[in-house]
Image (cartoon, rainbow, N blue to C red):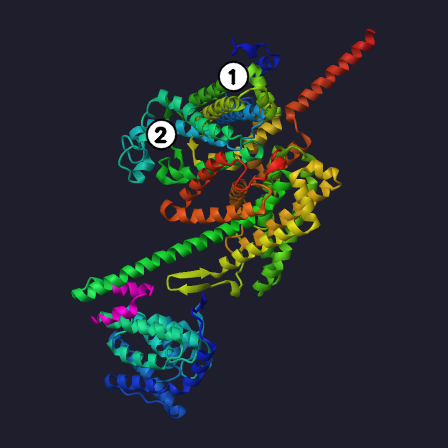
């Protein structure tokens, strides 16, 4: 998952970062000097051959039985300033650094099968395949694994790549010990990226807190990172009353802050769920409003939209983003055509018999479901989320908003606005509204109601297809996709009232938020039940929904 | 008396006659004809027929509200299942200490969930009379509360259908939860005996089949009596023009509520007879798709005839048994196609078709007769 940093580094900062990179050699030397006091000296910056001899020595130190000795060897590698250090450490961590029978150190590229492709750990050149019997893995234990992670983080701290530095600073939170404290303090002085700086300052402050410094609490205050909270909680139960009190206070304010963030997160998830409901229900609301019939196959039209996305991605392998964008018009068209077929094939023969229409369209939904099961597969299909849609927007340490949900939310609003425009600004919209209000009168004014029916049905079904495209990014695409949403969509329509798009929007979003608020203390299932019961009671008071149509139009 | 009134109708006499004849025939073929003979009806088939008959009773209940009241209930499965659960709870208590865990009072799933004692709503179900009353009361009470709320605020038509569907959906979700104390996902099963008779013996199965047949006959007569009475006329008037009936001065919602509750109780009775015959009750009976399937039985058989509902239930379920045995994948296609074809081409169902044929033949005969005697 790619994290979008917040706050963003300014352009000026980014420029400075580049300029300062050259000047940042001396802390490295400092670290080296520090470690050299304890560790065997390492020779750096020499002729290639000399360098490889030194490197071989470093690696050979790893190939010992004693784990503490290996630990020292790892430190030596960190101190060596060799530019392959990270590569070795990572390979070691992954268990891919191995020694061949002939004494060479190799890195295994792929350990499936009997013969493994390997490359030389020193030169990096491919050595072809080796039988796994010829290879001897350099074992590590959990303590070493942890040490390796920190060592890699320390090495990364000096990397040119900003992302690497950020990740490493993140990893060092709560891992700083006396040995690292000083070099890290030096790095903070030099670091140009504010996020890395902030993380390292926190890391250092946690270390200082562990040493019992009360002032460190001040630095940590306001941070929402879980490591910080752990450290403060530990400090709050320390023997030093002054420190404990300060830490407790900081913890309390953090908890307060977290509650707010959790509230925001609930709201976000609620709006996200609500936007899905709106998308699923709005097409239904349109057809129900105009024709007074409930299309039970609406959920299956949603499913068709989702499957269209899947099919587009199958047609355009390797380009999930493009496929998704193309799936928007394609999904609309597929669902709209299916909708027209349903209208022409069945519904037009059932004029004035809304309950029979409900049954007939239910039959169609069964057929469509089974068709997908037979023709494609009863199993769920995977729809790839394009890279620009995955990941999340990190607001702070406690609150990150997943991007795909944000896109769906935005998409819903766009679809809603477009429908609003169609309904308010086009000839079709005018006719649709006229037929919704009074079919007989509209017809006598020369509106071809049958044509309006077809167009409305196509529009409503097309929107269902769009909902399917959006849903394919959030849930599994399977034959039951539509069924899961149909009852909820009806609830939205019933709650919001017919013939009013605003009603659908408000009802959908509020039902989503209500659901998410109830969920933590009632559980997902009970929350759903409560919402259903709430709607049943709600229509006692307002049988025609939140925004009923007024006047004579309401009769019928 | 109003309850004997239906026996004066020819259709009721015919229906009861056919039903009793069929029951007698099945019993004779099961008991008298030796096993191995092609005409022998084995215990499995008797059981299957019993299941169909309980479905038929359920369909009659749905036809009562849909055919005569115009209420398309997509939630009658809920009443059916509630009756089934009431019966299931009684059967569960009858297991006693013969369960896997051997607990004298708690059913197996409660022991498994580490429950200490029986929840209050399980009390009393060890007594048959209490359980049998609850079979009618539980769905009746739900229908009363729900119907009161719905009819009072004049929720009708498609809205009402959707709300009933939401009702059964909500109940399904609720019964899926283990904390509800109804066995969660697995429901109630592993029954052993009913009223002291072993549920797995052939004789008990035959008895249950006959009991279901009698229940169907009684249910049919009750429904017939209701629709034949003045109350039934008001119902039909409500169905055809609710606002007008109200303006004339009838408290429409009371009639609706009464009939709805009776229908729910009949559905509960059907569920109670269904459970011992299939040996399990689980939340899938609450699923909206089952409820809507019931409506199809009625639509296929023919609305507002009652006997049509019975024909439809038996036909569709027989088709289901055959299809799911031969080619299970095709069943949903067939079911879906039936929904479409029946609503578009056969709005009056099989019963309507029969009546049409009958009428035409009579007309032909009349026309013929006229020619002979001018």
Residue A141 image position (x, y, % from top left): 29, 69
Picture disc at residue B92 = 2
Mark 2 and mark 1 lie on one chain; the one further toward the N terminus is: 2
Q: Are marks 2 and 1 in contact (CB under 8 Å)?
A: no
Label 2 secondary element: helix
Residue range in magenta is A211-232
Asked if residue B42 shows in the view, the reply is: no
| Residue reaching furthest to the front | A551
Residue B222 is marked as 1
Residue closer to the observer: B260 or A427: A427
Residue depicted at x 73% and y 17%? B361
Residue A226 x, y percent position in the rendering: 32, 63
Q: Is residue B352 left or right of residue A207?
A: right
- Front in this rendered view, residue B292 or A51: B292
Helix, strand or loop for disc 1: helix
To the question of a shared chain for discs 2 and 1, the answer is: yes
Q: Which quadrant is the C terminus of chain B positioned in?
A: top right
């Amino acid at each position: 998952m790619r994290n979008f940093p917040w706050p963003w580094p300014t352009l000026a900062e980014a420029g400075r970062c580049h300029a300062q990179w050259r000047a940042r050699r001396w802390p490295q030397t400092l670290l080296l000097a520090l470690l050299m006091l304890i560790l065997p000296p390492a020779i750096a910056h020499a002729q290639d051959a000399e360098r490889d001899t030194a490197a071989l020595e470093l690696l050979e130190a790893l190939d010992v039985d004693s784990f503490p000795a290996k630990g020292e060897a790892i430190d030596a590698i960190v101190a060596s300033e060799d530019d392959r250090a990270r590569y070795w450490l990572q390979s070691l961590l992954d268990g891919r650094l191995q020694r061949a029978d002939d004494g060479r150190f190799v890195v295994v590229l792929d350990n499936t099968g009997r013969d493994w492709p390997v490359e030389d750990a020193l030169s990096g050149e491919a050595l072809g395949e080796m039988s796994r019997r010829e290879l001897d893995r350099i074992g590590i234990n959990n303590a070493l694994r942890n040490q390796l992670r920190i060592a890699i983080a320390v090495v990364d701290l000096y990397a040119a790549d900003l992302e690497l530095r950020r990740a490493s600073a993140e990893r060092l939170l709560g891992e700083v010990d006396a040995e690292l404290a000083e070099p890290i303090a030096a790095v903070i002085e030099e670091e140009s990226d504010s996020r890395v700086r902030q993380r390292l300052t926190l890391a250092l402050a946690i270390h200082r807190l562990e040493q019992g410094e009360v002032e460190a609490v001040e630095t940590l205050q306001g941070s929402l990172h879980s490591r910080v909270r752990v450290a403060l909680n530990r400090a709050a139960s320390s023997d030093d009353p002054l420190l404990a009190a300060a830490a407790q206070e900081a913890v309390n304010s953090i908890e307060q802050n977290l509650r707010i963030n959790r509230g925001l997160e609930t709201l976000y998830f609620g709006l996200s769920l609500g936007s899905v409901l709106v998308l699923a229900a709005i097409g239904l609301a349109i057809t129900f409003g105009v024709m007074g019939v409930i299309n039970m196959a609406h959920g299956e039209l949603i499913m068709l939209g989702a499957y269209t996305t899947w099919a587009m991605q199958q047609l355009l392998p390797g380009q999930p983003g493009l496929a998704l964008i193309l799936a928007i018009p394609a999904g609309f068209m597929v669902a709209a055509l299916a909708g027209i077929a349903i209208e022409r094939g069945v519904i037009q023969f059932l004029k004035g018999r809304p309950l029979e229409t409900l049954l007939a369209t239910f039959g169609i939904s069964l057929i469509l479901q089974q068709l997908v099961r037979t023709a494609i597969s009863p199993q769920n299909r995977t729809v790839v989320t394009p890279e620009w849609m995955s990941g999340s927007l990190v607001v702070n340490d406690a609150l990150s908003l997943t991007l795909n949900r944000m896109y769906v939310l935005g998409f819903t609003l766009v679809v809603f606005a477009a429908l609003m425009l169609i309904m308010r600004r086009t000839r079709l919209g005018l006719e649709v509204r006229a037929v919704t209000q009074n079919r007989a009168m509209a017809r006598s004014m020369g509106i071809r109601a049958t044509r309006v029916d077809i167009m409305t049905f196509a529009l409503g079904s097309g929107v269902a297809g769009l909902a399917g495209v959006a849903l394919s990014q959030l849930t599994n695409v399977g034959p039951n996709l539509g069924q899961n949403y149909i009852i909820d969509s009806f609830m939205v329509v019933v709650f919001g009232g017919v013939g009013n798009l605003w009603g659908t929007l408000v009802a959908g979003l509020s039902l989503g938020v209500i659901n998410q608020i109830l969920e933590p203390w009632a559980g997902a299932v009970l929350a759903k039940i409560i919402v259903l019961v709430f709607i049943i009671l709600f229509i006692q008071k307002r049988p025609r929904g939140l925004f009923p149509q007024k006047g004579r139009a309401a009769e019928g | 008396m109003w309850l004997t009134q239906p026996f004066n109708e020819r259709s009721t006499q015919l229906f009861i006659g056919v039903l009793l004849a069929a029951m007698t025939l099945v019993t004779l073929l099961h008991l008298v004809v030796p096993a191995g003979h092609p005409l022998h009806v084995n215990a499995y088939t008797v059981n299957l027929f019993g299941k169909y008959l309980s479905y038929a009773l359920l369909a009659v209940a749905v036809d009562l509200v849909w055919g005569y009241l115009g209420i398309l209930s997509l939630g009658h499965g809920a009443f059916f299942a509630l009756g089934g659960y009431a019966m299931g709870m009684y059967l569960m208590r009858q297991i006693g200490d013969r369960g896997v865990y051997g607990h004298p009072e708690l059913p197996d799933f409660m022991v498994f969930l580490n429950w200490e004692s029986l929840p209050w709503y399980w009390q009393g179900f060890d007594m048959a009379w209490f359980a049998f009353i609850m079979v009618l009361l539980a769905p009746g009470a739900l229908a009363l509360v729900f119907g009161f709320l719905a009819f009072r605020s004049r929720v009708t038509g498609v809205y009402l259908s959707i709300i009933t569907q939401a009702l059964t959906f909500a109940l399904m979700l609720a019964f899926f939860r283990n904390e509800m104390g109804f066995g969660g996902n697995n429901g109630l099963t592993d029954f052993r005996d009913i009223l002291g008779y072993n549920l797995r013996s052939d004789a008990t199965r035959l008895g249950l089949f006959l009991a279901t047949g009698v229940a169907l006959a009684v249910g049919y007569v009750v429904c017939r009596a209701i629709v034949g009475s003045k109350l039934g006329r008001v119902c039909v008037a409500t169905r055809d023009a609710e606002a007008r009936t109200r303006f004339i001065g009838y408290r429409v919602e009371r009639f609706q509520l009464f009939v709805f509750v009776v229908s729910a109780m009949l559905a509960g009775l059907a569920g109670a007879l269904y459970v011992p015959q299939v040996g399990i009750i689980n939340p899938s009976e609450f699923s909206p798709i089952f409820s809507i399937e019931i409506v199809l039985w009625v639509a296929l058989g023919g609305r507002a005839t009652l006997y049509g509902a019975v024909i439809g239930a038996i036909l569709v379920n027989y088709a289901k048994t055959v299809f799911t045995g031969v080619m299970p994948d095709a069943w949903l296609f067939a079911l879906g196609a039936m929904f479409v074809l029946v609503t578009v081409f056969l709005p009056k169902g099989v019963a309507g078709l029969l009546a049409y044929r009958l009428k035409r033949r009579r007309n032909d005969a009349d026309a013929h007769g006229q020619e002979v005697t001018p």
